[in-house]
Image (cartoon, grey):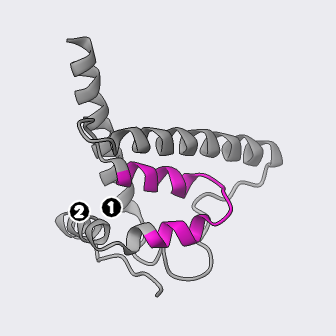
Amino acid sequence: MAAAGAAVAAFVVSLAAAVVVIVRLPADYFVGAAPRPILRVRSRVVTVILRITRNVVGAALIVLGAIMSIPGVPGQGILTMLLGLMLADVPGKRRLERRLVGRAGVRRALDRIRARWHRPPLEIDS
């Protein structure tokens, strides 16, 4: 019973987090060579702590997304992996983000969520 409750809670939390990020994402996030920095901090210590935290959370979301992509496991697998990838600092990240968002099904899902919250569709460089 506890496992079922945890699965439902993971599904609800991942769905809510995905929707919040997708809705708040600028429409031109995937246009250009690199995204604008969301947070500018002047302190080097704070910058390092934030970078480490972003990478740890990003890696955890990528792993959780991979688990949720397994049939029978509830959750938004690909969207969760995309969120984790957007947080992590890994080589080739921008190209992989664009490839994931460029998939027809993912793009439709993202644009449908944004439209529901009265946001413009995402723009993507070809």
Identify the residue under disc 1.
23
Q: Is-magenta flag for residue 23?
A: no
User: What quarter of the picture does the N terminus occupy?
Assistant: top left
- Please state the horizontal and vertical placement of residue 126, each as a whole percent of the image: 46, 87
Q: Is residue 117 left or right of residue 107?
A: left
**Nearer to me, 123 or 40:** 123
Residue 69: image quadrant is top left
Identify the residue under disc 2.
113
SS at mark 1 in the image: helix
Three-letter code, disc 2: Ile
- Please state the horizontal and vertical placement of residue 13, each as a whole percent of the image: 31, 36
Q: Residue at x 52, y 38 (%)?
A: 60
SS at mark 2 in the image: helix
Q: Residue at x 64, y 66 (%)?
A: 92
Q: Is-magenta flag for residue 91?
A: yes
As drawn, 51 above or below 60: below
Q: Residues within 10 Å of mark 2 (few under 14, many from 20)?
A: some
